[in-house]
């Protein structure tokens, strides 16, 4: 498939999601996954700003602890922090030269096998509400076209966050961000519950949660909530005894 | 970002809110200062949503209590809606939205309340209640006040969490590993620190809740009490739990 064709399909898919009763974390995951495919990078994630101005991971193309750690490392310093502060993209930042002023993040990213990193802002008029973070395992340059596509996907993420169900007032930006981050917290709680009940890793727990949501056409947040608070929607995910095998 | 004024309130909360402290987490001073920051006449944190709901903090006490009673009796209103939807409910002009809460609106206005803003007290799937602010004059909260209110709700959520855990321990419900959350714990710096979005903290909360057969709220309170009691970073304790290097009960033996 040509990139143009994939682009078209992605925007059709995303538009379909946005007009439906979508789950914001599901949408952000989808966008992160599509970034990896469309921009030929190796990992992508979306970070959002909380009401105290700190950045937190909301979704990643691959839900593994190592990658999430790379997002969390940027709470204080990193490309996403720079991007959010200036509102400008951080593109083709070379991790090896350590020139950008976040040695701790650069070291961790390199240890995970990445050599280049990019951050594109999630913009809303004059505010920045977060950043799209891209990681590459080779030093291939992100072209201007790549940046435009990435920025369009970041803009879609912004639109999705602003149109979450239940919050209708446009001025409630802080509440919308908090709601998205709170959905993320619920997912983490559910990962913990499931990991302990089934004696699996939290990464495996996420895979089970997401597969269950997709197989049953449920919203990821609803499944996570069902697991976290023990309500019936996800009963089959939770074995009465600890088996740790396939369900 | 949180305003300087609200930052002072949060610092006050941090210092004064023992898990079982007088005032239940929101002293009159903190409450008055918070009301000023939010430009409202009163604030009220309510734990639980049913008959057992407890009014924790007051502005003008009679009005707060009457507002909550009204909603509980009628089964409708902004606070109840905030609990049900999990998102803030901002009624900047009660009279304009009379169709939304037909039974509640008239009596609320008679109490002299014309604007109500309700924020859920929650951490992921943990739902504890609401923080409700009200005002005699109509008009919205500005974006800065909304940010302040969200940060305040965050801090109040944690003080409520620890208060409940301490109450539970006091009733003998928190045996064994619950020692960490016992009432003799002194509040330390960071007691009401903001809810961290760090993934492991919430993963560990889920794991601890299964390990001890307790709710998520108590599990998080135990984790935090464990960390603070040993002067450890919450994130480090959580990471150890998630990596299965640490079980809170083993450490207590």
Image (cartoon, coloured by chain):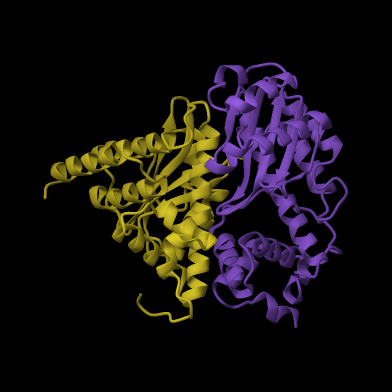
Chain colours: A yellow, B purple
x, y percentage for residue B8?
A: 78, 36
x, y percentage for residue A229?
A: 54, 60
Q: Quadrant of residue A112?
A: bottom left
| Left or right of A193 in this view: A118 | left
Q: Quadrant of residue B239?
A: bottom right
Q: In this orientation, which residue lies closer to the viewer: A81 or B192?
A: B192
Q: Residue at x 61, y 39 (%)?
A: B80
| Left or right of B81 in this view: A60 | left
- Can the viewer see residue B67? yes
Q: Residue at x 27, y 49 (%)?
A: A34
As displayed, is residue B151 above or below residue B246?
above
x, y percentage for residue B210?
A: 58, 71
As displayed, is residue A245 above or below residue B80?
below
| Left or right of B66 in this view: A21 | left
Q: Residue at x 76, y 29 (%)?
A: B42
Q: In this orientation, which residue lies closer to the viewer: B214 or A46?
A: B214
């Amino acid at each position: 498939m040509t990139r143009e064709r994939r682009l078209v399909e992605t925007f059709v898919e995303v538009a379909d999601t946005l007009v439906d009763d979508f789950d914001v974390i599901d949408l952000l995951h989808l966008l992160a996954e599509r970034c990896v495919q469309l921009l030929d990078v190796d990992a992508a994630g979306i970070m959002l700003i909380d009401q105290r101005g700190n950045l937190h991971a909301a979704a990643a193309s691959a839900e593994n602890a190592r990658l999430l750690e790379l997002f969390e490392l940027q709470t204080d310093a990193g490309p996403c922090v720079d991007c959010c502060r200036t509102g400008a993209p951080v593109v083709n930042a070379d991790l090896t030269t350590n020139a950008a002023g976040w040695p701790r993040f650069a070291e961790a990213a390199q240890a995970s096998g990445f050599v280049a990193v990019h951050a594109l802002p999630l913009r809303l008029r004059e505010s920045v509400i977060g950043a799209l973070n891209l990681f590459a395992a080779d030093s291939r340059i992100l072209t201007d076209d790549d940046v435009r596509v990435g920025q369009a996907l970041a803009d879609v993420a912004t639109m999705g966050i602003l149109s979450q169900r239940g919050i209708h007032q446009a001025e409630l930006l802080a509440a919308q961000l908090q709601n998205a981050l709170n959905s993320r917290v619920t997912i983490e709680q559910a990962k913990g519950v499931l990991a302990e009940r089934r004696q699996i890793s939290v990464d495996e727990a996420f895979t089970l949660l997401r597969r269950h949501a997709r197989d049953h056409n449920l919203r990821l947040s609803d499944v996570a909530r069902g697991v976290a608070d023990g309500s019936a929607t996800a009963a089959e995910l939770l074995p009465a005894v600890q088996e740790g095998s396939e369900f | 970002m949180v305003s300087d004024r609200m930052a002072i309130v949060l610092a006050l909360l941090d210092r004064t809110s023992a898990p079982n402290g007088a005032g239940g987490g929101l002293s009159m001073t903190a409450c008055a200062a918070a009301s000023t920051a939010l430009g409202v006449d009163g604030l009220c944190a309510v734990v639980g949503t049913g008959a057992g709901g407890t009014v924790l903090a007051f502005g003008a006490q009679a009005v707060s209590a009457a507002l909550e009673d009204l909603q509980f009796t009628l089964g409708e209103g902004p606070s109840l809606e905030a609990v049900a939807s999990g998102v803030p409910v901002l009624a900047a002009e009660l009279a304009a939205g009379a169709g939304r809460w037909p039974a509640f609106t008239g009596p609320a206005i008679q109490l002299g309340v014309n604007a109500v803003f309700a924020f859920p007290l929650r951490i992921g799937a943990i739902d504890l209640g609401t923080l409700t602010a009200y005002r005699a004059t109509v008009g919205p909260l500005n974006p800065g006040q909304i940010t302040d209110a969200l940060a305040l709700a965050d801090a109040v959520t944690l003080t409520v969490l620890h208060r409940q855990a301490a109450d539970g321990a006091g009733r003998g419900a928190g045996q064994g590993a619950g020692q960490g959350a016992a009432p003799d714990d002194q509040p330390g710096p960071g007691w009401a620190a903001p809810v961290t979005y760090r993934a492991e903290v919430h993963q560990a909360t889920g794991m601890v809740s299964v390990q001890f057969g307790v709710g998520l709220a108590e599990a998080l309170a135990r984790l935090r009490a464990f960390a603070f009691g040993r002067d450890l970073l919450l994130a480090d304790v959580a990471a150890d739990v998630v990596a299965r290097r640490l079980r809170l009960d083993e450490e207590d033996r």
